[in-house]
Image: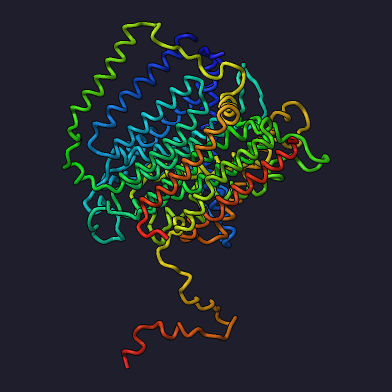
Amino acid sequence: MDLPFLLYTLLKIVVVVFALLTAVAYTVWFERKVVAHMQSRWGPTRVGPYGLLQPLADVIKLITKEDITPSGVFRLVYLAAPCLAVITALLVFAVIPFGPRTEMGGIDIFQITDLDIGLLFILSVSSMGVYGIALAGWSSNSKYSLLGGLRSSAQMISYELAMGLSIVGVVLLTGSLSLRQVVDNQSGSWWGIIPHWNVIPQFIGFFCYFVSAIAETNRLPFDLPEAETELVAGYHTEYSSMRFAMFFLAEYTNMTAVSCVATVLYFGGWSGPVFGPEALQTVLPLLWFFLKVLAFLFVYVWIRGTLPRFRYDQLMAFGWKFLLPLALANMVLTSFVQAVRYGG
Amino acid sequence: MQSVLPSLFFYALATMILVSAVVTITRRNAVHSVIWLISTLLGIAGLFLHQHAEFLAAVQVIVYIGGITVLFLFVIMLVNLDEAAKKKQFAGQWKIVVICAGALLAELGFFIFKGAEGFYFAEPAGGSLQPNTQLIALALYRDYLLPFELASLLLLVAMIGAVVLAKKDLK
Amino acid sequence: MSNGYFENYIPILLLAGVVTLLAVGMLLLSYLLGPRRPSKEKLAAYECGVMPTGDARQRFSVKFYLVAMVFILFDVEVIFLYPWAVIFHELRMLGFIQMILFIGLVLPGFVYLWRQGIFDWSETDTSEWPDTPPVTLPGVSLVVPNVVQEATPFSGGSQ
């Protein structure tokens, strides 16, 4: 505990947050582009080559727009809600390992911190994510916002159960809650070809995790809280300019976080073929991690471009009557198989 | 610095808990109270962390902040605040309060008067090399297995109770 | 010993600080850079362009509370599973039996909730509704559903 440690850590955090914000901005571009091509359109093309500067233009536009604070709102809560959404979304990245343990100046540069309870940390931070949305809905003093916020909170807590249960399967295989150990546990391969990834024994768990994670992040086909055909824009109806953008940012950060967690838990994290000179060997794991996360983001967009929205009663029934029992069955099955493997 | 830091954390957390607890009960706006309650609970989670009880800290956040307080918020979000503001904020049961607080203060005063021998200073959990979660797991699933299984009965009763209370037409 | 422990959590504290600064900074920046031309209509709550009626705070379905309550109970159960899963390699078959017992005791509650219709969000029983006519695309099917003919409200009245 000394000053260099603090400074290095701070530097690392700033770099991670900055990289993350850039990545999130380009996730928006990526989504617009991919969805556009799925719908035979071009997507953003005007700002920069292939519209690559579009995120920058968006940010400038959103910052210089007028902040409208509607007259009936509860001002402090109304302002705190988007902050809360952004904070809880970004805090998840504290425990995600982006690469193998690589020390520089005594601290690990590819992970902000490796907690013994890393998985529970992620769950607890995401369980606090409800508040940004619920408080936004409440403080706006608009019917659409309140309904959207209420629906969204009920949806998020419902799917949190299935998510928590599906992760238990991974913990059963790993025997640890530390994310780094989860990844280390997935190194190696079966017969030298099939990687030792958790997704193979845990494909039901992975399915449950990913579906409930999509619901947790309020993305299509579970984007009921902002179903524009009935709720205008849901909990952020009354938000404009940067405050709206902060909810937007939180949503895409959550998407990225879910993709990272899915990569770590089920797809071996940074593991992949490593070769070449030493410098390349340090960078390659990061590249594999990035590519896997990108693949998940693509699936997100793909699902958005393909599936229609659920009805609210269907959504609740799906979560409680299908996903939860399925995750439970998966957990029981996994523990039985593990018990047999350990032998008595 | 190393020895000062933990106690610094402790006093910061204690201040956070006390201040937000007082603000929680004195706010007129119930949603503000909930936000301050969250801050109190976060502080308590911090205290658990401070005591090396990582698992309990996580449970504190997941169950209390992510579950129970959300339920509070659901109830309070739908309260008409204009009407609530007209109601009396404190129920006027000050006699009972004075007796309870007096008893607590007397106890506290007694122990402070007795000095260090009156306290049992607990070692931080997880003194061994095992992570805290495993220690708790061993305690739960080996030493206190029966109470643990009985806890599930409690959950069952609570589930049925919730339905019976909230639903009018039981099938 | 405590040194390493606290070092694990200080980065989280720092991250929380950085992120909070970022969030507040974003709010401030747009506050400073954006124009401000408020008007009465602009500041009214959005209600599809008409004047807002009444307050947003009304009574809501009790189901939201029920879902939240049931969530807490299951959440506690799921939390119990985590330490169990962590030391499962020590508990082995005994652990499996323990958990089957635990879940077996809670499961009747889940079935009861299901039977009581806690997870059915719509009040009406849609299973008794008549089947919706099959969707037909022009040129694909020649069968025109008679619903379409009945649906125009003024077709009968004008004659």
Q: Answer with left or right where residue B134 lies relative to residue A273.
A: left
- Give how far across and how far down residue B72 sits, in percent: 35, 41
| Towards the viewer: C15 or C69 | C69
| Left or right of B156 in this view: A167 | right
Tally of marks? 0
Q: Residue furthest bottom?
A: C159
The chosen color scheme is rainbow
In this rendered view, identify the residue nearer to me: B15 or A244: B15
A147 up-or-down from C141: above or below: above
On-image quarter of the C terminus of chain A: top right
Q: Residue at (24%, 34%) from the top-left corner?
A: B27
Q: Residue at x 38, y 16 (%)?
A: B11
The structure residue drawn at horizontal position 45% and vertical position 36%, both measured from the top left corner, is B63
For the question of whether residue A291 can be seen, the reply is no
Q: Please state the horizontal and vertical placement of residue A274, each as a whole percent of the image.
A: 76, 33
* Residue A279 seen anywhere in this rendered image of the structure: yes
Q: Is residue A170 above or below residue B16?
A: below
The quarter holding residue C151 reads bottom left
* Quarter holding residue A135: top left
Q: Residue C94, image x and y in percent? A: 66, 35
Q: Give the percent coordinates (x, y) of residue B160.
A: 43, 49
Residue occupying the far right of the picture: A191
Q: Quadrant of residue B140?
A: top right
Q: Nearer the viewer, residue A267 or B40?
A: B40
Tell me what residue is drawn at x 23 percent, y 59 percent: C51
